[in-house]
Amino acid sequence: MKKLIMTFLILFLGSGTLTVVHANCFQSVSLGEYPLGEWSDAGRTWVVSDTVGSFSDAITTQSALETHKNTLIAQCSTKGNAVIAAVEQRLNEKRAGLGAEFDRTCTNSLFCSMIRDITIQSREYEIDREISKMKSWYKLSIEKCVMHFNYTFDVLNPRLCATE
């Protein structure tokens, strides 16, 4: 398909009008963005997520680029830990309502009273496991976020025209 398009352009425009331009440097660059990911309950009635950076941030000098990189790296941790705290709060709120939820759904008074405590303890254990899994997952996402901005900086910094 590419060959067909090139042939058409050469025939239509002539072979002398096609030039390939390679930029030696860029007037501005962006370190982009990194989505930290999202965590939700099974029914997706709540979702917690955040993103670090923005593709619209255009940086024109190497010193500003380094400052911006450091800011974004700090935001990886700040925003990531805020997401962890928000998810943990949601899960702990769910934990606090386990007794009321059980009482609302279990209607056989003899049977329910026999399994109430063990059922609630089991659900609390599930929530503890989910909190632990979520924290590990977001800590890895925070590390990947830092690596993303370091790598992008290392690639783009030497390609920025304005060295000051």
Image: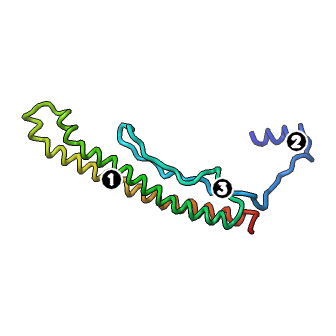
The reply to whether discs 2 and 1 touch (Cβ–Cβ < 8 Å) is: no
Q: Earlier in the sequence, mark 2 or mark 3?
A: 2
**Extreme residue in the top direction:** 107
Q: How many marks?
A: 3
Asked if residue 133 lies left or right of residue 160, the reply is left
Residue 84 position in % (x across, y down) = 39, 54
Amino acid type of the residue tagged 2 in the rendering? Ile
Name the amino acid, label 1: Ile
Which class describes the residues within 10 Å of circle 3: few (<14), some (14-19), or many (20+)? some
Q: Nearer the viewer, residue 123 or 163?
A: 163
Q: Which residue is mark 2?
A: 10
Q: SS for tag 1?
A: helix
* On screen, residue 59 above or below 110: below
Secondary structure of the residue carrying numbered label 2: helix
Q: Nearer the viewer, residue 82 or 10?
A: 82
Residue 24's image quarter?
A: bottom right
Q: Residues within 10 Å of mark 1 (few under 14, many from 20)?
A: some
- Residue pointed to by mark 1: 131
Tell me which residue sits at (11%, 31%) in the image.
108
Residues at marks 2 and 1, CA–CA distance in whole angstroms: 61 Å
Alpha carbon distance from label 3 to label 1? 34 Å
For the residues carrying marks 2 and 1, which lies nearer the camera in this image?
1
Q: Earlier in the sequence, mark 3 or mark 1?
A: 3
Q: Which residue is mark 3?
A: 30
Under circle 3, the secondary element is: loop
Q: Amino acid at mark 3?
A: Ser
Give the percent coordinates (x, y) of residue 38: 44, 47
Residue 112 vertical position relative to residue 64 in the rendered view, above or below: above
Q: Residue at x 28, y 44 (%)?
A: 94
Q: Look at the image and tell me in which quarter the N terminus lies.
A: top right
Point out the tag, 2 or 1, that comes first from the N-terminus.
Answer: 2
Position above or below: 115 against 85: above
